[in-house]
Every structure is written in C-alpha cells, then in structure tokens.
Image (spheres, rainbow, N blue to C red):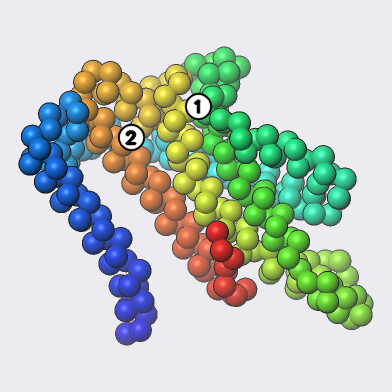
C-alpha cells in the first residue's frame, strides 16, 4: 500500500499539471480567439495526430533509433574516456579544455558539415550530433563519480592487500555508478533533442524534425505540433527508461547524487 501511495505521489502531480496546462491552452485559444496559424488548439493538434499517426510513428521510430545509437555511442565514449582520465592525470588535464569546448559549441551547427562529409542521404550525421551532445554530461558525471572514493576507503583496501580489480569492484564502481546514471539520465533527453534539431538542417526526410519543418513551411501548424507531440513522447520514453534503469541499479548502492 505504501508503494502505491509513493507511486501516486510521483505520478499524480505531473499528470495534474499536464491536464491544467492543456485546459489552459484550450481556454486561451478559444477565449482570445487566437488564429490557428498563430497557435492551434489542443483539439486540432490531437486531430492531426490521429490522422497522421502512421507517419508520426514512423518518423518517431527513425528519430528514436538515431537518438538511441547516439546515446549508446556517446555514453561508451564518455564512460571510457572518464575512466582513462581518472587513472591518468595527464590525460585528464589534456582532455579538460576539449570537453569544455564541446560543452559550449552548438553541436547541432555541425550537422550541415557532417551531411557534407557523409552525404545528404545518410543518417550518420544525426547519430554523431546526438553522440556529441551525450558525451559531455556522461563524461563529466562519470569523472566526478570516479573521484568520490574516500581516501580512507582506498587505504583500507590497501591494508587488506586487495588487488586493483577488487578495489574497483568493491569501492570505485559502486561509488561511481550513481553519478554515471545521473549523467545518462540528463543525456537521454539531450540525445532526442539533438537528433530532432539535427534533422532541421537537411538530410533524408525521415525523422520528426524533417516533418516538423515541412509541415510548418506549408502553414500546417497543427500538423507540425502533432509531430512535436511525437517528439515529446519519444523524449519522455527515453527519460523514463533511463530513470527506471537508474532506480533498479542505483538503489543497491545508496541514494543518487543531486543532478
């Protein structure tokens, strides 16, 4: 019963907030008589989502695939290089300005360059854009987690004559895991956003971003918002799956760090 109550406390507030926002949106559009080309109402958006549910699902599948590949690639690179940086201080100092530069560079601006490199019909540019967006938060969070092991714990393992593998398995990894998942939780949404925005700059007309720009260019704003809704669903799915994995894994190692 307590579990059900805890779940209700987590689920009900965002559901109530979403319902209030939709009702407020509808009241604003109808009460102020806002033209559809300025802001379509939620009823019009849902109607377009119903009519174009097939293309929206297909576009969401393409965008979701690119975002997933980017998430995996960026996470593997971020975690792997963070492990190296934690072990080799020289590498850490060399990588720090590069990571800082990636954090401030508008990654999606690289999309046109990558389309020129891989071809306008390739999805690789979108995967790379998503991977670069994922890399920074995963790298920073993982590196921070690897540095959280208390010296007294390392000294204790040294006194016990533990091997490097045993130290990593019993102390370093359990300490770093919550930080890794914090980075993944933040990066999951960034992967979807980056993949969608990269689709604005060209490439095959297959993802959600491509259909949003096409619908908006044709003044089909309700249809464009319907594709936006599809993108929101993909982003929420990525975040929910990552948060669930974090909950299942991190609860063995204590509370997660603040994001």
In percent of the image, x 26 and y 58: which residue is there?
Answer: 17
Up the image or down, 223 lies above or below 163; here it is above
Question: Distance from label 1 to label 2 (Cα)?
Answer: 15 Å
Residue 138: tell me if it is visible: yes
Horizontal relation, residue 33 to residue 68: left or right: left
- Give residue 160's position: percent from left, percent from top: 89, 81
Horizontal relation, residue 31 to residue 192: left or right: left
In percent of the image, x 67 and y 50: which residue is there?
Answer: 140
Q: Which residue is mark 1?
A: 123
Displayed quadrant of residue 114: top right
Q: Are marks 1 and 2 in contact (CB under 8 Å)?
A: no
- Quadrant (top left/top right/bottom left/bottom right) for the N terminus: bottom left
Q: Which residue is mark 2?
A: 58
- Give residue 123's position: percent from left, percent from top: 50, 26
Up the image or down, 172 lies above or below 162; here it is above
Horizontal relation, residue 214 to residue 245: left or right: left
């Amino acid at each position: 019963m307590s579990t059900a109550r805890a779940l209700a406390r987590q689920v009900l507030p965002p559901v109530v907030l979403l319902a209030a926002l939709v009702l407020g949106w509808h009241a604003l559009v109808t009460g102020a008589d806002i033209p559809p080309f300025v802001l379509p109402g939620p009823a019009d958006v849902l109607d377009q989502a119903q009519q174009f549910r097939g293309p929206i699902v297909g576009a969401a599948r393409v965008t979701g695939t690119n975002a997933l590949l980017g998430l995996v690639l960026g996470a593997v690179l971020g975690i792997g290089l963070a492990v190296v940086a934690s072990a080799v201080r020289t590498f850490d100092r060399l990588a720090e300005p590069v990571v800082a530069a990636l954090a401030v560079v508008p990654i999606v601006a690289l999309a046109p360059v990558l389309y020129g490199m891989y071809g306008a019909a390739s999805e690789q540019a979108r995967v790379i854009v998503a991977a670069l967006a994922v890399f920074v938060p995963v790298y920073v969070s993982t590196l921070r987690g690897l540095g959280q092991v208390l010296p007294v714990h390392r000294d204790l393992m040294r006194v016990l004559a533990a091997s490097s593998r045993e130290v990593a398995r019993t102390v370093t990894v359990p300490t770093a895991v919550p930080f890794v998942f914090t980075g993944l939780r933040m990066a999951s949404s960034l992967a979807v956003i980056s993949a969608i925005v990269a689709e604005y700059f060209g490439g095959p007309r297959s993802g959600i971003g491509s259909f949003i720009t096409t619908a908006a260019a044709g003044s089909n704003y309700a249809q464009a918002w319907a594709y936006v809704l599809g993108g929101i669903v993909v982003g929420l799915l990525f975040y929910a799956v990552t948060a669930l994995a974090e909950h299942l894994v991190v609860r063995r190692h204590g509370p997660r760090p603040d994001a």
